[in-house]
Amino acid sequence: MIDCTKRLIKNVLGGQMSNTISQKAAVVNEVNAILGSNFDSSLTAKEQLTNDQISTIKANIFTNITNGLVSYSKELNDEKELTRYISGMISNHFRKSKELNGGNSYTPTNSGRGARDTQLSELSKLLGTYTEGTEEFSQIVSAIDSRKIEIAAEKSIKSTEKKRMKDLAALNTDALPDGMKALAENLVNGIS
């Protein structure tokens, strides 16, 4: 069990975690403490912090949670679990908190399984209507797996095409031999 002596004393003497701050406030406070007047609210905190500074924020929040200064609803009995939790929590606040994400409204990119693919979403709904172990359930799982493979292939093709376009756009046709210039210019002009 993590050493919670200070937390226990505080709870007994001062009431159940009466002086705790929210996790969001803890992250914002740590970023402000590290960056101070150098903090530029028009940029994301992650852009302004080094990996060492982020590690310091994680360590400070770990200490503050174990001392009962930052709210945390789970039992404090696994340091590794708490460390993983803090890492994810900080990342979430870097993305979602307007104070830390350059003032942008957070919009999730994928709000659940199959959220961007209608077919996958509907297959998931259909799957929920059948009992595991039935033939229909197996058929739907197979269809979901097939659709996921199709989506992955489509993404791969799009990624490859995007890279190709970027490479062509950066191509210096003047550096090519005369016989290749026309071929390259046709490719470059084809993407313009």
Image: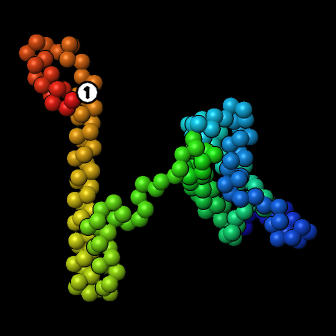
Q: Nearer the viewer, residue 140 or 53?
A: 140
Give residue 81's quadrant in the image. Answer: bottom right
User: Is residue 91 visible to the viewer in this orientation of the structure?
Assistant: no
- Identify the amino acid type marked 1: Ala
How crowded pointer 1 is (Cα within 10 Å; few <14, some 14-19, many 20+) is rated as some
Residue at image location 42% in from the left, 54% down from the top? 109
Residue at image location 25% in from the left, 27% down from the top? 169
Name the colouring of the figure: rainbow
Does 35 appear above or below 2? above
Residue at image location 24% in from the left, 33% down from the top? 165
Give residue 148's quadrant in the image. Answer: bottom left
Task: Give x and y (percent) for residue 129.
Answer: 32, 84
Location of the C terminus by quadrant is: top left
Task: Give x and y (percent) for residue 137.
Answer: 27, 82
Q: Is residue 79 left or right of residue 164?
A: right
Q: Is residue 74 left or right of residue 163?
A: right
Q: Is residue 6 left or right of residue 130?
A: right
Circle 1 residue:
169
Q: Nearer the viewer, residue 191 or 171?
A: 191
Can you name the residue that lies furthest to the right here?
Answer: 13
Element at label 1 = helix
Location of the N terminus by quadrant is: bottom right
Can you name the residue that lies furthest to the left here?
Answer: 179
Residue at image location 34% in from the left, 81% down from the top? 128
**How many numbered badges does the structure rendering display?**
1
Task: Give x and y (percent) for residue 145.
Answer: 26, 67
Task: Give x and y (percent) for residue 175.
Answer: 21, 13
Q: Nearer the viewer, residue 108 or 50?
A: 108
User: Is residue 154 visible to the viewer in this orientation of the structure?
Assistant: yes
